[in-house]
Amino acid sequence: MAFPKQSANLTPHKDSVFTIVEMAKKAKAEVGEENIVDATIGSLYDENSELVAFESVFDHYDTIDHRLKAKYGSIAGNPNYLETVYQWVMPKEGSKLSHCVVATPGGTGAITSSFITFLEANQTIILPDVAWGSYRIMANQFQFDIATYEMFEDDHFNLASLKAQVENVKQKQDRVVIVLNSPCHNPTGYSLSMEEWKALVSYLNEVSKENQVILINDIAYIDYGYDVEHMRDYIKLFDTISDQFLVMIAFSCSKTVTSYGLRCGAAIALAQNEQDITDVKAVLERTARVVWSNIPNAAMENFVWVINENQEAFLKEKQIYIDLMKERSALFVEEAKQCNLPIYPYKEGFFVTLKIEDNEQAKTIHEAFLKNHIYTVLVNKGIRIALCSLRLEKIKGLAQKMQAIIQTL
């Protein structure tokens, strides 16, 4: 008899991304970096294949007093950090909604704590079919059922498919909890248009007349969208949500300020009624206390300094890499189009994904890529390519190489 609880999943966890990362690392040592394409991990790399760590962020971090780094931060998050995150995430016009912010270890902590705040065991969460694989792992770990909607219909968001799943789920539980990763969707690089957001919010307001609605909006990559001035415009639409509709925004400092290892993020709850926010905040804070206690104090303090004292330099440095991502993505998407390599609709962000709806076929193609030292990440209904980690010379001709390999199978 096993010692873990009966409901525990005893299957050893092998993270699909980091497993391939290790394979790529081994191949570099064996055959040389110049002979492989490592399009695995979702972190920014420069044109020298070096991990990007912004000088506008880390030069100051290095000067923070050791005692401040060693010190406990507040369990809910330091007040100056919570206010800075809220002001940073919200559109310039702000929001009329009641809100709370709770610090989390990266966007992952924000999403996980949202799941366990709103769902009982065996209730259903609604996920996109093409998505970051960790959503499913989180749901399984806490014994939530999963319903999936098709993310795309042709080249646009498939609202009809989402509606169908919502209608099914609301028949068996009192609430509908939906995950939507936009802008800069991982793994496809899709961002909903303002019209798509309007239609979605309008529909969920209708649903909320009968069932509570919780929309978890994962914005991990929002600060690398290409239309910098308007990336947050859609958040204004949340002001129109009903009093039975709550929005949770999952924010990641890891991505925004290239501090992946510092594990700093936030869960932001938005609702019409103050009491609803008070209740959610109480649960989020209790979760923080019992799961991670608090997040790195210096990471919070450094984010506050970057945004409030060094924002101009930070934005200027960040824009260099947004422009680089534009160049990288434009090159790959154009070459994919030229050689008829099918990809999901891409707009902006770190990733592009090959469209392969048959998962067995995707596995075969993925294995063929590995044999040819092209390291990518297998996802549901596709293969993710992390353009963020590939310098331009590695991207040039990559689509044609991939298509040539596929045609031999």
Image (spheres, rainbow, N blue to C red):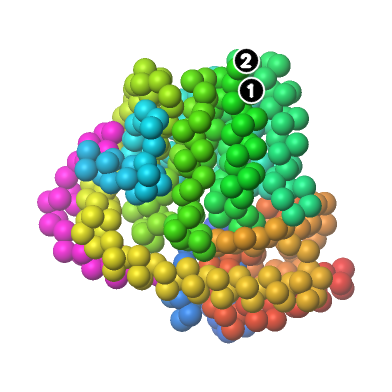
Q: Is residue 44 visible?
A: yes
- At x 59% / y 21%, what residue is drawn? 208
Q: Quadrant of the C terminus?
A: bottom right
Q: Is residue 184 magenta?
A: no
Where is mark 2, residue-wise?
210
Residue at point 50%, 61% (across, down): 227
Q: Quadrant of residue 293?
A: top left
Q: Residue 189 is drawn in which quadrant?
A: bottom right
Residue in the picture at 34% in, 31% down: 100
Image coordinates for residue 211, horizontal then vertical, percent: 60, 17
Q: Amino acid at mark 2?
A: Glu
At label 2, counting other C-alpha atoms closer than 10 Å, the crowd grade (few under 14, some 14-19, many 20 or more) is: few
Secondary structure found at label 2: loop
From the image, tell me which residue sits under label 1.
Answer: 207
Image height check: is 191 above or below 333?
above
Q: Quadrant of the N terminus?
A: top right
